[in-house]
Image (spheres, grey):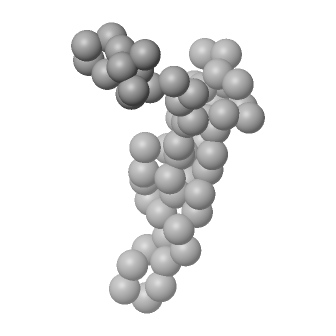
Amino acid sequence: METRDEAELRVRVSELREAGVDESMVRVDMLCGRLVLPTSYRLSRFVANPVRESGEGLRGE
């Protein structure tokens, strides 16, 4: 999730906490803006074992 609105970021982080997501698996990056580009915030969540649509791991495990 990426936004320029810090309040929206806080709401999303709060929702993750309420859902019981492990906070150590969440990363918040602040992309500092300049005159032309405003500051934006990126919220990422680590996924330990991504699964393909077929239901198999990345290596077919």
Q: Position of residue 15 (x, y in %)?
A: 57, 25
Residue at 26% in and 17% down:
53
> Extreme bottom residue here?
35
Q: Name the spot of residue 48 as percent of width and height, x first.
A: 57, 27
Residue 25 located left or right of residue 57: right
Question: What count of labels does the image hold?
Answer: 0
Q: For the view shown, which residue lies furthest in the right direction? A: 24
Determine whether, in the image, residue 40 is placed left or right of residue 14: left
- Up/down of 37 relative to 49, above or below: below
The residue lying furthest to the left in this view is 54
Give the image location of residue 35, x and y in percent. 43, 88
Taking the spot 51% from the left edge, 24% from the top edge, the residue there is: 49
In depth, the one of 55 and 16 nearer the eye is: 55
* Residue 43 in the figure: left or right of residue 18: left
Would you say residue 61 is visible in this rendering?
Answer: yes
Quadrant in the rendering for residue 51:
top left
Q: Residue at x 74, y 35 (%)?
A: 24
Figure quadrant of residue 38 = bottom left
- Quadrant location of the C terminus in the rendered image: top left
Left or right position of 35 against 31: left
Depth check: 43 or 25 in front? 25
Q: Nearer the viewer, residue 61 or 37?
A: 61
Q: Is residue 51 visible?
A: no
Q: Position of residue 23 (x, y in %)?
A: 72, 32
* Residue for point 43% across, 43% down: 1
Q: Is residue 20 above or below residue 15?
A: above
Which image quadrant for residue 10? Answer: top right
